[in-house]
Amino acid sequence: MLIALFVVIGYLAGSITFGYWLVRFTKGVDIRTVGSHNLGATNVWRTYGWRYGLPVMLLDVLKAFVPVVIATHVSGELAGVLTGAAAMAGHARPIYLRFAKGGKMVATAGGAFLGVAPVLGLVGATLWILIFLLTRYASLASILAAAALAPLAYGLGYGWPVVAFGGAAAVGVLVLHRANVRRLLNGTESRFVLRRSRRRADPGPAEVPASH
C-alpha cells in the first residue's frame, strides 16, 4: 500500500511541467508553440536562454529525485524504481495538461537514478555531459547515456530492479527521441548553442522557429 502511494506521488510530481508553467507565467507563451514544440528544458533553453532553461532542468531533476529518494529510504530499492518510473511517466504524459504530450524524460530520469542509485546517476550524468560537450547534440547525449544505464548498473553491482529500470529508461528515451534519431541519421539535427544571441527577439505565441 505504501509503495502504491509513493508511485502516485511520483506520477503527480512528475506531471508538474516546469518548462510549460515557467514560460506561461513569465512570458505568456505556450512553450509547445515555439522551437521544437517540446516543453522540456532543452527547448526552453534554446528558445529563451539559460536563465530559463537551467532552472527548468534543475526542477525537472528535483521533481523525480525528492520522491524517489524518500521512497527508496522508506520502502527500499524497488519502491524507488517504481516511483522514478512513475515520475518519468508523469513528465511524458502530465495529468495537469490532460495527458497531452509532455517532455522527453531525460532530466527527470536523471533525478530518478540519482535518488535510487546515486553512483549510477552520477556516472550517467557525467557520460551525458561528456558526449554533449564533444558533439553538442543533446539528443545524442541523452540516447547514449540512457543506453549505458543498464550495463553500468549491472557492472556497479546494483540489484535487478535498478538494472531493469535502466533498460526500460533507455527504451523510453529512445522512443521519445525517434524524430531526433531520424534527423541525426539524415544529418539535419541541430547542434545546441549554450548562449542565445541577444539580438534575437523572444518568440511570441504566433512565431514558430525551425524545429530541433
Image (cartoon, rainbow, N blue to C red):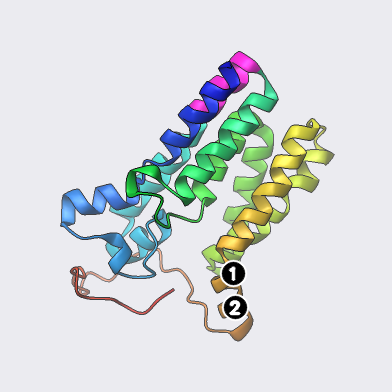
The magenta segment: 67-75
Residue 4 location, x and y as percent? 57, 24
Question: What's the residue type where badge 2 is placed?
Answer: Arg
Depth check: 51 or 159 in front? Answer: 159
Depth check: 70 or 58 in front? Answer: 70
Q: Which residue is mark 1?
A: 178
Label pair 2/1, CB-CB below 8 angstroms: yes
What secondary structure is marked by label 1? helix
Residue 81 location, x and y as percent? 64, 32
Q: Does residue 65 sit above or below 135 in this rendering? A: above
* Residue at left offset 21%, top offset 70%: 203
Magenta highlight on residue 73: yes
> Is 162 placed left or right of 125 in the picture?
right
Magenta highlight on residue 197: no
> Is 29 placed left or right of 126 in the picture?
left
Q: Chief secondary structure of the magenta span?
A: helix
Quadrant location of residue 131? bottom right
Q: Quadrant of the C terminus?
A: bottom left
